[in-house]
Image (tube, rainbow, N blue to C red):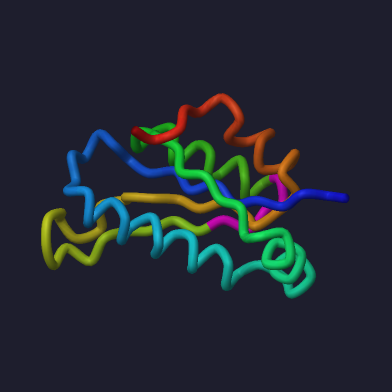
Amino acid sequence: MTEYKQAVLLREDLEMSKGKMIAQACHASLKAYKKADGEKKQAWEDEGSKKIVLSTDESTMIERFQRAKSSGLNAAMIKDAGKTELKPGTKTAVAIGPAKESEVDSITGDLKLIN
């Protein structure tokens, strides 16, 4: 059985509040999910919608987003609206997948889980 997952890359260098971090991760996850094709969505849901949240900084996040896109994986980047803690347009999070776990890991496998 092929396992599917989604990785959310979240910037810890911004010093967002925990609530803000959670909201940004949710935005990224949902946006990437909406971009996925129906077959990947269904497989991911059937397997329990596995996701991980990884710590990153802006340059690494952008580089991984570009690698995912060039590899044919669906990916979504979140830019904050600037209504609470951050300046408008601040890049806060990226989600990659849902996709085959091996494909996601080829882009994100060296990143550490968020604390």
Q: Nearer the viewer, residue 20 or 46?
A: 46
Where residue 92 appears, x then y in whole percent?
Answer: 32, 50
In the rendered view, does 17 fall on the left or right side of 100? left
Where residue 34 appears, x then y in whole percent?
Answer: 57, 73
In the rendered view, does 81 fall on the left or right side of 94? left
Where residue 84 appears, x then y in whole percent?
Answer: 11, 62
In the rendered view, does 54 fall on the left or right side of 79? right
- Quarter of the view holding residue 14: top left
Q: Quadrant of the C terminus?
A: top left
- Quarter of the view holding residue 68: top right
Magenta span has 73? yes
Q: Is residue 46 above or below residue 13?
A: below
| Magenta-highlighted residues | 71-75
Residue at the extreme left: 84
State how many labels appear: 0
- Quarter of the view holding residue 81: bottom left
